[in-house]
Amino acid sequence: MADPMLSVSGLSKTITLHILHGAEVRPLRDVSFDLDAGEFLAIAGPSGAGKSSLLKCLNRTYLATAGTARYITRAGETVDLFSAPEREVVALRRDEITYVSQFLKAPPRVPAVDVVASVLTQRGVELEVARERASAMLSRLGMGPSLQTSYPALFSGGEQQRVNVAKAFVAPPRLLLLDEPTSALDADNRERVIELLHEAQAAGTAVIAIFHDRDLIRRLADRVLVLADGTAREVAPDDDYIAGDSVTDELLEVSR
Amino acid sequence: MVAPLLRVRDLNKIYSGKGHRIVACEDVSFDVYPGEVLGIVGESGSGKSTVLQCLFQDVIPTSGSAFLTSFHGGERNMWDADRRERRELRTHRMSMVYQNPRQGLNLMVTAGGNVAERLLAADWRRVSDIRAKASDYLVRTEVPIERMDDFPAFFSGGMQQRVQIAKALANNPELVLLDELTTGLDVSVQAGVLDLVRDIQSRYGVTAIVVSHDLGVIRLLADRTLVMKDGHVVESGLTDQILEDPQHPYTQLLVNCVTN
């Protein structure tokens, strides 16, 4: 049996707030899971359960306090995402791992199409080609030419989210980390994102995605990691927790 | 793995006089890789500008070593350079954009002449080549070409800064040092200068060290960031990690002082 593409073991995160007299927050405690190429792992759980912290640790936006994340690169090398040299993380973010935050953080005064194209130009694609592909992806997400050449800072929440999602799919990575990618989208756009996710998965992209919408989890996920109070347990997408009518209430119950 | 372009080890700069001893920076070590932008952030007096001044040898460090790959194959400490080598480092290999354009420009030499000075220092000789190259760089940094023969003393602060950037880039330096390049400019002009630097960086892949007290500038330009306080590097990491998960009490304070 081959090693999984990503193997997270014993991930804990403690944040010490020195400016609040050393108060400690522990968003994650001893979280472990594996993920194979092309697999879709959904992360579920109530607000504050540590879901975003988990993705940020994998992206190295947060430093893990304990644990390892053994990732096998495209070149077949094994790196620990939690402790790899910063230079390697920069290269992996450029070439293999894409993290899409819940809210777009676009540089100011850059048109939406260039925000998306930058993902490609960083990988060495010519600017004109990159713009064409970025524009096609934004069009697919229902964004017309006039919006594409405007600054995302002026956009509505749903429009910003589509720019963010376009960044993820304009050059599908090997590992995609998504933080509630459809939270601000209408039904049509949500369906387009699901379509893009199916395509990426078929092309071998492994996905870890936070969703609150249990319908989306059922439709997309191979496996579900339920986080409550920083600890994780794995359930199947058709588990009662996910299939239940009031999943959030039940999850809140678990955390008590 | 790519080798670093610059390695700095145990840089110390101590100013001592009668009865007092001021540590500007102490045991500062870091690497800069080709094509990368390294940010150095900290409050005034933290020693961040001293690091740049030492690298550009405006100031001679008390101790430490710095190795530039292209300088004797990265084997010879830059701070052991003789006069001729030091001049070569400053004219061919590195350039500096100062917070105050008066330091980086001769305000009573024309804008074109300022850029030309740099090219002359780098052994350019033909006047027509120099003029063409100078105008090319002024265009790239969005200095109106009809102002090429005017004196920067009569330019606005933002345009002076753009002439400085043109001058700094003119001889294709391996490493560009940018010291508080937007401080003192009003916000709309700051935005223009930042956009210019970001555009140049993405187009030409310039390797740079950006020193700023402004986390917004660092967020926009730097891949990795060092946080300095009282002459020490208290924390270093990927820029987004420094901003979102700061570890050191001072960095936490700094990040939480940003108003938006």
Image: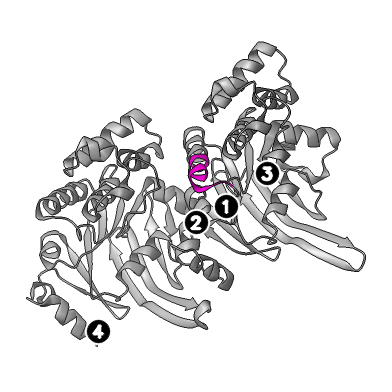
- At numbered mark 4, what does the secondary structure look like: helix, strand or loop? helix
What residue would you read off at disc 3? Answer: B100
Which quadrant: the N terminus of chain A? bottom left
Mark 4, chain letter? A
Packing grade of label 1 (10 A; few <14, some 14-19, many >=20) is many
Question: Disc 3 marks which amino acid?
Answer: Asn
Q: CA distance from mark 4 to mark 2?
A: 33 Å
Looking at the image, the residue that sits furthest to the right is: B18
**Secondary structure type for disc 2:** helix
- Residue found at x 34% / y 28%: A128
**Tags 2 and 3 both on a single chain:** yes
Looking at the image, is mark 2 or mark 1 earlier in the sequence? Answer: 1
Can residue B70 be spotted in the picture? no
Disc 4 and disc 1 on one polypeptide chain: no
Q: Amino acid at mark 2?
A: Thr
Q: Secondary structure at mark 1?
A: strand
Q: Which residue lies under the disc numbered 1?
A: B39
Q: Are marks 2 and 1 in contact (CB under 8 Å)?
A: yes
x then y, percent, for residue B28: 70, 59
Do discs 3 and 1 belong to a common subunit?
yes
Chief SS of the magenta region: helix
User: Alpha-carbon neighbours of circle 3 within 10 Å: few (<14), some, or many (≥20)?
Assistant: some
Vertical relation: B141 (above or below) B244: above
Which region of the structure is painted magenta? Answer: B185-194
